[in-house]
Each structure stands twice: as C-alpha cells, then as structure tokens.
Image (tube, helix red, strand yellow):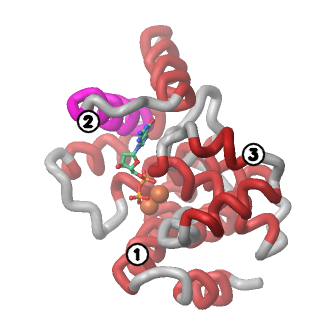
Amino acid sequence: MTVKDYEEIIGKRMKSARLKHSKNVAKEAVRLAKKYGADVQKAEIAGILHDATKETPDDEQLALMEKIGLSSAEMKNSSRKLWHAISGSAFVQTELGITDEDIINAIRYHTTGRANMTVLEKVIFVADFTSADRDYEGVDKMRKIADKDLDEAVLEGMAFTIADLAQRKVTIAPDTFAGYNYMAALKSKK
Ligand code: DGI
Ligand code: FE
Ligand code: FE
C-alpha cells in the first residue's frame, strides 16, 4: 500500500482537520528523517498513520488493543489520552498488515515517548510537536531546537508535556517519565 492509500483509509476515520494534521506530521517527519538519518519512507508512513485511531470509539479501540494482547481491564487503568497511540499501533498491524517494528513502535510511543528511542521514534515524536498546524506558546522555540538537535528537541517536548500534565495535576505515564529521565541523563553526559 502507498501513503496515498493510507491517507484514504484514515481519512474515513477522522475529521478533515485531523487528516490535515496527519499529513503535516508526515511531511515534517520526512524533513526530519532526511536531516537526522532515519528511513524517509518509514517516517512518511508512521507520520500519516500516527493518529489513525484518535477519533475511533473507545470500544473499538479496546477491541484493537485486545487483538495485540492487551487486556481491556489493564487499559482502563491508563489515561484515555494514551489509548490512541496504543490502539493506533494495533490498527496498523491488524488492519493494514504493517509488520515493521520501528514503524509500529514510532506510533505506539508517539504520545509518551520512552527510554532508548530509535531515530524514527524520535522523528515522529518531534514532528508531532513541530508540524505546520501546531500553534502553541513556545512552538517557535521548539522548531528552532528541532532544526539543531533532535535529542534536545525530544527532551524539550518531554519536559513541556510533563510540566503541562503536572500543572493540570493529571497522571503521568511511566514511559513519559522514563523517556524524560533517559534524555536528561544523556544530555548531562554530553
Ligand atoms: O494526538 P495529538 O493531539 O496530535 O498529540 P499527542 O498524541 O501527543 O497527544 C497529546 C495529549 O496527550 C495531550 O493532551 C497530553 C497527553 N499526554 C501525553 N503524555 C501523557 C498525556 N496524558 C497523560 N495523562 N499522561 C501522559 O503521560
Ligand atoms: Fe497523537
Ligand atoms: Fe498527532
């Protein structure tokens, strides 16, 4: 299947604004992949598909996650915001037949990040913060950092997310902390 095919499939599952975001993330992921040496084709695919199930009903997302061996009971304990990354990684495997581990993990960890990410995982994580449609306080700084240092951009994104979640006093996923600690330790060693 081509990126156009994927675009058509996910376009039926989401509103036009989210499809536009997905296309922007794919485009930004391609740019970052070229810059930082990730597989460009995989970056485009992971980018277009990263939010594939963001507008999918909860019961369908739970069914997708069960298909890859995660129990609904377990998932109900994790934040609803994190479901789409996991169910999206299940969707691309079970419905689209994608078997590439790096693409699957780039989607799986695009919201939280994690420790020891691959270059492709980092590219998707950062592209979601710097895509053309993003317009938050600090996006210009984030784009500047993304143009200079991919690891620094990952750390900046993780710090931004953790600060925002702590400010709102909502739960923070273990992978989010693990990712932050990993990148912060790496920076202090540099
Ligand atoms: O799907 P997008 O909107 O493009 O972006 P995303 O997948 O990065 O989702 C961002 C949302 O996820 C934002 O509301 C913050 C939330 N989030 C990220 N990490 C965590 C989290 N929410 C909780 N509760 N815990 C986390 O660790
Ligand atoms: Fe997302
Ligand atoms: Fe996104």
Q: Residue at x 36, y 38 (%)?
A: 157
- Residue topped by disc 2: 164
Magenta stretch prevailing secondary structure: helix
Res 50 quadrant in image: bottom right
- Residue topped by disc 1: 18
Magenta segment includes 163: yes
54 relative position to 162: left or right: right
Q: CA distance from mark 2 to mark 1?
A: 22 Å
Other-residue count near label 2 (Cα within 10 Å), few / some / many at <14 / 14–19 / ≥20: few
Instruction: Judge whether 114 appears above or below 96 on screen.
Output: above
Specify whether tag 1 is near ligand 1 (CB below 8 Å): yes
Nearer mark to the viewer, of 2 and 3? 3
- Residue topped by disc 3: 71
Q: CA distance from mark 3 to mark 1?
A: 28 Å
Sooner in the amino-acid sequence: mark 3 or mark 1:
1
List x then y, in percent, for residue 170. 33, 33
Query: What residue type is disc 1 on?
Result: Arg
Q: CA distance from mark 2 to mark 3?
A: 29 Å
Q: Are marks 2 and 1 in contact (CB under 8 Å)?
A: no
Under circle 2, the secondary element is helix
Magenta residue span: 152-168
Specify whether tag 2 is near ligand 1 (CB below 8 Å): yes
